Image (spheres, grey):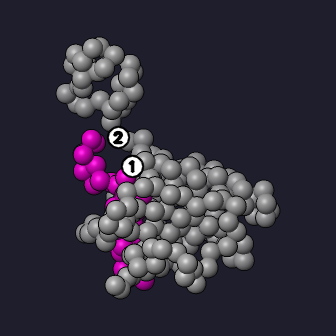
Amino acid sequence: MTHQVHAFEPPERFVAGTVGAPGERTFFLQARGGGRVVSVALEKVQVSLLAEKLEELLTEAQRRFGVELPDAVLTSSDNDPLDNPVDEEFRVGTLGLAFDVDTATVVIEAIAAGETEAEVELGDPDEADETDDEDEEPDDDLDRLRVRLTPQAAREFIERARRVVAAGRPPCPLCGQPLDPAGHLCPRHNGYRR
C-alpha cells in the first residue's frame, strides 16, 4: 500500500483552525507552502495536547540544549481563517514531536489513523533528533504530514491553537460541560435544562 508524506520544511503557514459552528466544529491542522495546501482533521483534545506538549518541548530544548527561545507572542500575526478549500487529506491518529538540535527546529508529524487506531500519542520531549529512516515503525504505510518549524513559528502556532480551542462553547459553571445556545441537561441540576 502506498502512502504519502506531505513535508513542509519550513511551511509558509502552519495553523490550527476550525470549520463549523461551536459545538459542531471540525478541527484541522493546515500547512501551506510551495503552491500547495494540506489540511488534516483531528480532535479538539489533540489540538490542545499538541499546543501543551509543544510548549514543554520548547522549554526542554532551552534547558537541555541552550536554544534561544523568543518571548511569548503577545499578539498573533495570523488571525486569518483556514485557506479554502479545506479538503481533509486524512484524519490524524498519532501526533509526534521532536526537536532537531542541528537545525534548532521543531518537527511535528501528524500520522493518519489506522483502521483500528483512535488514540492520541505525543512523542517524548527527551527525543533529540528526528530521522527519516525509521523502518521499525509499524505505521510506515500510513499517510503523514511533517512540518518543521522555527521556535518563533512554534510559539505562534501554540498561541493560535490555544485561542482556537478556547473559542468554543463556554463551560457550564456547575458541571463544566459545554453549554449549547439552548442550554444543556445539567447533571448538577438532576437533569433539568440549564
Residue 38 visible in the snapshot: yes
Q: Which residue is mark 1?
A: 44
**Where does the magenta region start and end?**
16-44
Q: Quadrant of residue 103?
A: bottom right
* Residue at 31% across, 20% down: 187
Q: Where residue 155 sits in the image (x, y, percent)?
A: 58, 57
Q: Where residue 164 sits in the image (x, y, percent)?
A: 41, 48
- In this image, 139 relative to 193: left or right? right
Relative to the observer, which residue lies in front, 177 or 139?
139
Q: Quadrant of residue 89?
A: bottom left
Mark 1 packing: few (<14 Cα in 10 Å), some, or many (20+)?
Answer: some
Q: Quadrant of the N terminus?
A: bottom left
Amino acid type of the residue tagged 2 in the rendering: Gly
Disc nearer the start of the sequence (1/2): 1
- In this image, 161 relative to 20: left or right? right
Q: Nearer the viewer, mark 1 or mark 2?
A: 1
Which secondary structure dominates the residues rendered in magenta?
A: strand
Q: Where residue 140 sits in the image (x, y, percent)?
A: 46, 78
Mark number, residue 178: none
Amino acid type of the residue tagged 1 in the rendering: Lys
Tags 1 and 2 in contact by the CB under 8 Å rule? yes
Element assignment for label 2? loop
Relative to the observer, which residue lies in front, 75 or 36?
36
- The residues tagged by marks 1 and 2 sit, at their Cα atoms, a distance apart of 10 Å
Q: Which residue is mark 2?
A: 168
Element assignment for label 1? helix
* Residue at 70% across, 68% down: 128
In this view, 63 is above or below 87: above
